[in-house]
Amino acid sequence: MTAFDVDLFVIGAGSGGVRAARIAAGYGAKVAIAEEFRFGGTCVIRGCVPKKLLVYASRFEEEFADAAGFGWSVGEPTFDWPKLIAAKDAEIARLEAIYQNVLARAGVDVFQERATIEGPNAIRLANSGRTITAAKILVATGAKPNLDAGLPGIEHVITSNEVFHLSEQPQRIVIAGGGYIAVEFASIFNGLGSDVTLLYRGEKILRGFDEDLRDALTSALQARGIRIITNDIFTNIEKTSDRITGTLKSGEVLQADQIMFAIGRTPNTGSLGLANAGVATHMSGAILVNDQSQSSTPSIYAVGDVTDRVALTPVAIREGHAFADSVFGKKSWSVDYNTIPTAVFSTPEIGTVGLPEHEALRAHGTIDVYKTSFRPMKAILAGRDERMFMKLIVDHASQRVVGVHIVGPDAAEIVQMAAIALRLGATKADFDATMALHPSAAEELVTLREKWVAPGEAAG
């Protein structure tokens, strides 16, 4: 097809890179891909998939306890961390093999080694020293955990890369961070019986989320025994034979078996050779791309977390597919970044789609807010005081629902369906006209009738 060795060379065999390679090959393109670690990328190997498996494990203790309220007698449960990690590893190996088989069936040439960019159309393989030319290059190398390199003792902490491979469950763990990963692992270890402290430099965890969600989850985590320290950071970390000690800016000293940093992620572009091809990057290292995922160098594209657009696996997959369709399938389209549903798999979990209240106010000026808090049916017989929270945000002028936010059991499952309604432009009247499914928690979304009025405001 061209004078190059391949039509497309993909660097990184994560979700976005594999999808792009497979689709492009399906259009008849000669495709090669390089991966220096394991196939499947962050999500499959050391991210959302193994994390969700650990989330499931962390919720069983509560299920055992709740069973008594429903007439079951359960013996004293015990937990085996090595057994869980071994089961997780077996599942991840199975999924990695699937990714490799997908590439093989598509006819993609696979290189299990590091690849760097030598020029606009040239790739160098680290192990063999071979140079391969390509008409198009796609960078899909994802992101890596941030660390405070200047913090004394930072070499003693773990990140989301290492946490999945601990030989022992930490009985005491301090997690620095206030985003998805920090909150999720705080819930995981708390559910497994560890003593958990969550340390966040900001005023409130989950920055950017709807304020009601942030408050509801904070209260729920604290009620479960997780200590949350805000407006503070580590100034020093020391390790002895039997513990790790962290000193905070406030002067407090925390002792733990492990200290985990989950303070964000940085696009994985270091030493990739982007400058050799004149590829423009943000100061964070993210590759700057247009809505077609094309960089400042026309032959080089990038998808997924390495572009720092929306760091979610389904987004990377959609970007990879759009790239392959547009460049090799003559079906030009770009990704719609509106109404992306997302979940925080804490316990209780968060599911959200659309605008949080503060952003809805900026975008629409006048909004109507509907919200409710109630005990889920299962919690009543279980004797739990935890409550479920739901919130609808409606643009006052058009009556379109522009935000759906949920805290509670199965929040992610409910919000996935709500995302369809938001994408189709459903109005509050459409929600009201939808028949309720009873008894369910989700029915609350279609039975909310009274607008919420802030204290001190007059009802409109």
Image (cartoon, grey):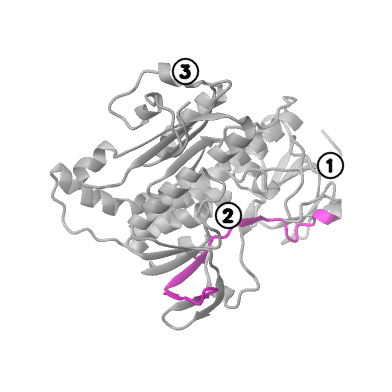
Read off the magenta span: 247-275
Q: Which residue is mark 3?
A: 430
Q: Which residue is depicted at the point 35% across and 27% down?
A: 443
Secondary structure of the residue carrying numbered label 2: loop
Which tag, 3 or 1, sits closer to the chain's start?
1
Residue 186 magenta = no
Secondary structure of the residue carrying numbered label 1: loop
Closer to the camera, 354 or 334? 354
Mark toward the viewer: 1 or 2? 2
Q: Which residue is mark 1?
A: 4
Which tag, 1 or 2, sits closer to the chain's start?
1
- Residue 219: x and y in percent read 39, 52
153 on left or right of 52: right
Secondary structure of the residue carrying numbered label 3: helix
Q: Which residue is mark 2?
A: 38
Q: Which residue is depicted at the point 82% across and 50% down?
A: 280
